[in-house]
Image: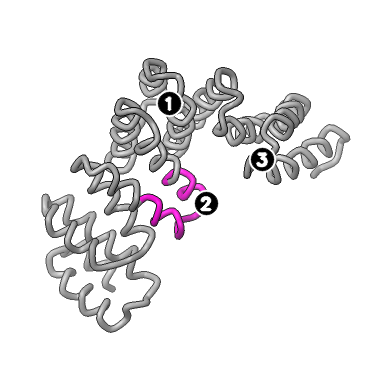
Amino acid sequence: VLSLEVARDPRGAGARLAAFADEYPAAPELDELTVALAAAYLAQGMRDEAAALLTRVEGPRSSLERAYLALEDGRVDEAADALERAADGLPAAEATEAIALALALTQGGPEAARLAGEAALGVHRLGTFDAAAFGAEVAALPEADRPRSLALGAALAERVGDAEGATELRERLWRDHRDAPEAAAAGLALARRLASRDPARAADLLEQVILGHPESAVVPSARRELRRVRSLLRGGSR
């Protein structure tokens, strides 16, 4: 009922949500309801109310929304901290993207941080991302900032459903920055995309990931994928 009221009457829903939080402070749905109400406030231009609301709840979704509000205000370090807190409770793909954004904001140069922040805000607020334009801007960054930026761009492209754009950015990362830590995950993603139509090439790519990045956290997944691809090459179904 409360979720319907958030959509229909965000001003009136605030009191109901506060009462719900007082009665059920550990309710798992409290985090998402708070974010839904904050989004409704933002849509009505009630930014201060949204920001105040989000400070009352600790959860991955509310932490994520606090990160984007901080990012809009130029509070980069605060945004990165909130992203890292959010990552602890988000599903794996979203957590990876949150960490990638936090790293892009804090471990690169100012232009890399600007590019990452603007792109992530575009995806979060508008659901839009131009992989080609993003890639062109990455080319102008210092070389040390490019692998991290390409990895983030691929994740953002995937979030808006642009599989081709994500693949192009990962191919650039693998081709031009193969020794970078981010290349291992890019190689694994590329191999998975290749596996059904070109298992031999996928197997070769997975072997390069495993041998070239033996300390990477993705190596166990790459080994499992390699076993599956080899079974395809032998004519098996798995």
Can you tell which of label 2 and label 1 is closer to the viewer? Answer: 1
Dominant SS in magenta: helix
Query: Residue type at mark 2?
Result: Ala
Locate residue 85, reporting x and y percent: 39, 56
Residue occupying the far bottom of the picture? 23
Q: Earlier in the sequence, mark 1 or mark 3?
A: 1
Q: Residues within 10 Å of mark 1 (few under 14, many from 20)?
A: many
Residue 49 versus residue 108: which sits nearer the camera?
Answer: 108
Residue 41 versus residue 210: which sits nearer the camera?
Answer: 210
State the quadrant of the C terminus.
Answer: top right
Q: CA distance from mark 2 to mark 3?
A: 20 Å
Query: Residue type at mark 3?
Result: Glu
Residue 12's image quarter? Answer: bottom left
Q: Earlier in the sequence, mark 2 or mark 3?
A: 2
Q: Residue at x 49, y 45 (%)?
A: 96
Badge 3 marks a residue whose secondary structure is loop
Residue 77 versus residue 149: which sits nearer the camera?
Answer: 77
Q: Which residue is mark 1?
A: 145
Answer above or below: position of 109 versus 43: above
Q: Which residue is mark 3?
A: 215
The magenta span reads 83-98
Tell me, yes or no, whether the highlighted magenta stretch contains residue 37: no
Q: Residues within 10 Å of mark 2 (few under 14, many from 20)?
A: few
Residue 33's image quarter? Answer: bottom left
Q: Residue at x 34, y 63 (%)?
A: 32
State the quadrant of the N terminus.
Answer: bottom left
Locate residue 225, reporting x and y percent: 73, 41
Q: Which residue is mark 2?
A: 92
Locate residue 7, reporting x and y percent: 23, 61
Badge 1 marks a residue whose secondary structure is helix
Answer above or below: position of 223 versus 50: above
Q: Residues within 10 Å of mark 3 (few under 14, many from 20)?
A: few
